[in-house]
Amino acid sequence: MSSNVADLMRSNLLDVFDELDPERRSAAIARTYAEDVVWHEPDRVHRGREAFVERTAELRAQCPDWVFQPDGPVSVIDDLGHLGFQYGPAGQPPAMTGMDIAHCKDGVIVELYTFLTVLRQLS
């Protein structure tokens, strides 16, 4: 299961959060997360794929020129995955770092926890 969890973690970051095209992002959401996925952000909780689609579209609209990049390898323990990331304007030092921790089951992410650290404020 570890390679599947690792693939899901990379898809979560690169195919969903870093994807600018809404149709490709929605397709990635459909194949990466359970229908009833629960996503915990620092300040809110989202339930279900539709909420995921809406929130990721919001995030991409807020900072369309920013990119997500993995910050180290994926770590896997049983059905849990962890991937650190960097986020910020393309070609510049990251404005934020963070990590995603996901519980995976039956080949999809069923629960996702996102932690963020703001490194610098951009105006």
Image (cartoon, rainbow, N blue to C red):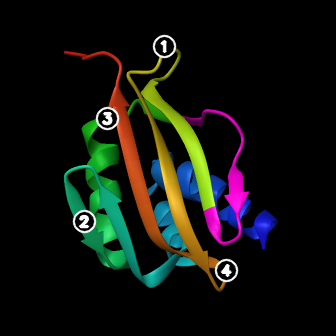
Residue position for label 3: 63
Instruction: Give the answer, above or below, for where 114 lies relative to 107.
Output: above
Magenta highlight on residue 63: no
Camera-nearest residue between 77 and 3: 77
Q: Do the CB atoms of the residues marked 1 and 3 lie less than 8 Å apart?
A: no
Q: Give the secondary structure at mark 1.
A: loop
Which image quadrant is residue 120 in? Answer: top left
Real-space Cα distance between discs 4 and 1?
35 Å
Real-space Cα distance between discs 1 and 2?
30 Å
The kind of residue tagged 2 is Val
> Which dot marks residue 107?
4
The number of numbered discs placed on residues in the rendered structure image is: 4
The kind of residue tagged 3 is Cys
> Which dot marks residue 45?
2
Q: Nearer the viewer, mark 3 or mark 2?
A: 2
Residue position for label 1: 92
The kind of residue tagged 4 is Gly
| Residue range (magenta) | 69-80
Magenta highlight on residue 71: yes
Which image quadrant is residue 106 in? Answer: bottom right
- Residue 32 in percent (x, y) is at 57, 71
- Dot 3 or dot 4, earlier in sequence: 3
Is 43 left, or right, of 63 in this rendering? left
Real-space Cα distance between discs 1 and 3?
14 Å
Q: Give the secondary structure at mark 2.
A: strand
- Residue 100 in percent (x, y) is at 49, 51
- Residue 102 in percent (x, y) is at 53, 63
- Residue 85 in percent (x, y) is at 53, 37
- Dot 1 or dot 3, earlier in sequence: 3
Q: Do the CB atoms of the residues marked 4 and 1 lie less than 8 Å apart?
A: no
Q: Give the secondary structure at mark 3.
A: loop
Real-space Cα distance between discs 4 and 2?
22 Å
